[in-house]
Amino acid sequence: MKIKRELYIEELNRLLVDSNIKQMATFEQHEGNDTLQHVVNVAWNSFYLAEKFHIKVDYEALAKGAILHDYYLYDIKESGLSDYRHGVSHPRTALLNAEKIVPLSEKEKNIILSHMWPLTLFHMPKSREAWLVCLADKYCAFNEMILHRMNLIQT
């Protein structure tokens, strides 16, 4: 387990030092949490689920997909989009933005596109990693919006 955790931390750190990715800290999401904290919450909770349930995953894909799943880079309140329109459109925006800064595998693209499933009905998770990010995103969003918990990192 320790080796997997170290590999995951290494991949997360590689992503989180990128100045493009750091921009997410400037956008509010989920009742005062910023987008960067949200994606870190999702990344750690995705890893936690894989570890807890002994799910074999591609740790690089899991980290990339989790960190980039909300890489849409706009303020939701100032966007003029309804909650529904944002919900269904931001995965595509996040993917297009992510492709500009990092090469993505098909699995990583699906993680980003499918994280809002079932809202995005035609973009269903196709891998264990995509399912983990989809589930962790919902768990984190609930905790951030309803319970007002900001840091949800599992250790």
Image (cartoon, helix red, strand yellow):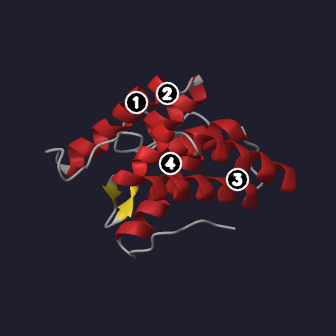
Q: Identify the mark nearer the N-term, 2 or 3.
A: 3
Q: Using the image, tell me which numbered label, if any, was put on residue 101.
A: 2
Return the x and y of residue 14 as percentages of the image width and height: 65, 41
State the residue position of label 1: 97
Indicate the secondary structure of the residue bearing disc 2. helix
- In this view, the residue in front, 116 or 94, is 94
The Cα atoms of the two marked residues, 4 and 2, are separated by 22 Å
Comparing labels 2 and 3, the label whose residue is closer to the camera: 2
Q: Quadrant of the N terminus?
A: bottom right
Q: Image check: 146 left or right of 61?
A: left
Q: Identify the mark nearer the N-term, 4 or 3.
A: 3
The Cα atoms of the two marked residues, 4 and 3, are separated by 13 Å
Res. 129 visible in picture = no
> Relative to 100, does residue 132 appear above or below in the rendering?
below
Indicate the secondary structure of the residue bearing disc 4. helix
Mark 1 neighbour density, 10 Å: few (under 14) some (14–19) many (20 or more): some
The image quadrant that residue 91 belongs to is: top left
Instruction: Tell me what residue is drawn at x 78 percent, y 53 percent.
Output: 5
Q: Using the image, tell me which numbered label, if any, was put on residue 50.
A: 3
Q: Are marks 1 and 4 in contact (CB under 8 Å)?
A: no
Q: Identify the mark nearer the N-term, 4 or 2.
A: 2
The Cα atoms of the two marked residues, 1 and 4, are separated by 19 Å
Comparing labels 1 and 4, the label whose residue is closer to the camera: 1
Mark 2 neighbour density, 10 Å: few (under 14) some (14–19) many (20 or more): few
Q: Image check: 144 left or right of 109?
A: left
Amino acid on which the number 1 mark rests in the picture: Asn
The Cα atoms of the two marked residues, 2 and 3, are separated by 27 Å
